[in-house]
Amino acid sequence: MQRMSHWLRAPYRTYVYGINHLEALIQMGERRYTPLGRFTPGPFQGWHFLWAPGLLGFIASVMILAGCSFTNSPFKLNMDTTWFFGEPVQSPSATPSETKLLFAIVLTYAGIILLMRVWLRLAEVVKLHRGASVKQLWLMLAVWATPMIIAPPLFSRDIFSYAAQGEMTSHHISPYLYGPFTMGSSPYVSPVDPLWGNAPAPYGPFFLFLDGSFARLTHHNQLATVVCLRLLEVVAVGLIGWAVTAIARALNRDPGEALVLGALNPLVILTLIAGGHNDAIMTGLLLIGVALALRKHFYWAFFFCALATAIKAPAALGIAFVAWSWVRDEHAPKRERLRPLIIGSLIGFITLSVTSWMAGFGFGWVRNLLSNGTVRSWAAPATGIGLSITKLASLLGLHWSEDVVLTVTRSVGLAVAVGSSLWLLWHSTKRGWLRSLGVALVLFVMLGPVVQPWYLVWGLLLLAACYKGREHFWLLALSIAGPFMGLPGAGELVNGFKHASIGLVIVAVGILLTFLAAPMGSWTQWSWPEQRPIKQVPRSR
């Protein structure tokens, strides 16, 4: 038994060893090759510097807005009537300028890099020093988010699918049975990604109810419906900000740090506000439910977690973990937890039933939950492994069906996610049910058939208010890496470098390197622990 336990702990020890060395390597690189090496951190001098990251983040957002507003920008949909500006030139003889395209891409990437650098250093400052003004951080969020609210939907066309599904709902056409293309020629249909044109919706009934209400409220105007959906996600980010600070206060943690790691996260700014994904409203409702559970308002907590589930199904994990947390005694018999689970399930069922009645299409969304599995992305480990096995088998002369291999690897990934979540639930009293829920949500994303960057917010924003130890490293790492998953423009950037003049390439690379390495101000010194002089202990004679 001891030998088995030793072997089971071996992967964990390898992980700790590897991650410790990775973090040390990153810190060494920051010291040697970034402006941080210029500073010797001294005593912290207060929060008067917050205007600096606020201004730098605003500049970064404006750069992204400007870069994405070019008519031929690859970061948005270039189609007439889909936004108020940045539409393609009407003249059929006009050809897009390669120089403008390259400039748009460089400007956007430089803005994203600057935004991430500012946030990363600010996140490290609030980790080391408590007490940042929450009011000033809310103002910073408003300043950073405003250009993204003005910008057209960026990096994804999903919001146009939402609008089309809302139009279907308003006409009592079930999005659970048909895709948007069933409406034929329509301003709502043209902007929809063909990949999802005939795909039924996997979203919950409460989202379809809101979606359809927007279509009716705007008198079936496609652009106005998209604007309403963008504003809904902005409100949802406000709910996220309120909830993470409430959770932090309930846990006696710094609400300023929770707000920085949560609502100010580049993943939120770029995918939930700029991208307009409905994961914002799902996560906001889920976090409100968690905050209410910490205040022991369990019935309301179940209700909000169920509302979140009626947006997207993964929020149902919140009901299970809230129910498990009802009984605080770590040594209480597990059967005592059965009653809260039954109550939570009952409230969840009633809420889903009522919202299904409001939407008018029943529970058809349940069978569509794996519809995004048609996407085969290397970013998802379960899918990437399956694709790798298929290609390796082909090189060896074996003709294995890619569909069969992917079914196996994805099923294994889902089984591991379910098993890990059950283990986390069972041990959640000992390790903390909030952290366990956050890790479980991240695992469901990373082991699922498709990994989209906006999926990561489900668990990361919860961990923003309750992380411990190494979870902070992964929160930062996934938040920085996430927006680059599938980010368009990389291919156009490489092609632009190939065909542009050497002078233009030098200027473009210079701009990127400047925003990657330029100093951001002396305030960044406080993102490192203060270096105190080592006292020399006199030797005894």
Image: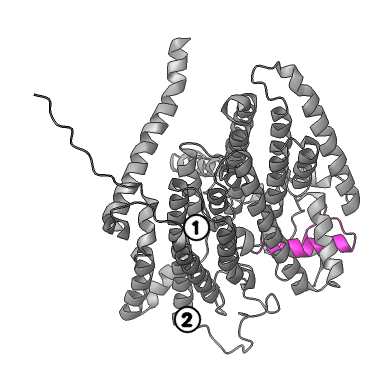
Residue in the foreground of this view, choosing between 283 and 153? 283
Q: Which mark is first along the chain, 1 or 2?
A: 2
User: Is residue 370 visible to the viewer in this orientation of the structure?
Assistant: no
Give above or below for 397 relative to 180.
above
Q: SS class of the residue under badge 2?
A: helix
Pointer 2 with pointer 1, Cβ within 8 A: no
- Seen in the picture, residue 246 relative to 207 is either above or below; the reply is above
> Mark 1 belongs to which amino acid?
Phe
Q: Position of residue 153 (x, y in %)?
A: 64, 68
Q: Is residue 300 magenta?
A: no
Front residue of this view, candidates 435 and 185? 435
Residue ranking furthest to the top? 1
Position in image of residue 326 (x %, y %): 73, 28
x and y, in percent, of residue 444 in the image? 61, 39
Residue at which label 1 appears: 484
Q: Residue at x 52, y 61 (%)?
A: 487
Asked if residue 533 lies left or right of residue 123, the reply is left
Regarding residue 61, the answer to whether it shows in the image is yes
Q: Which residues are magenta?
A: 155-180
Q: Nearer the viewer, residue 402 or 374?
A: 374
- Seen from the viewer's position, the closer of residues 63 and 539 is 539
> Few, some or many C-alpha atoms within 10 Å of disc 1 (few <14, some 14-19, many ≥20)?
some
The local secondary structure at tag 1 comes to: helix
Q: Which mark is residue 284?
A: none
Residue tagged 2:
100
Could you tell me which quadrant the C terminus lies in? top left
State yes or no: residue 174 in magenta. yes
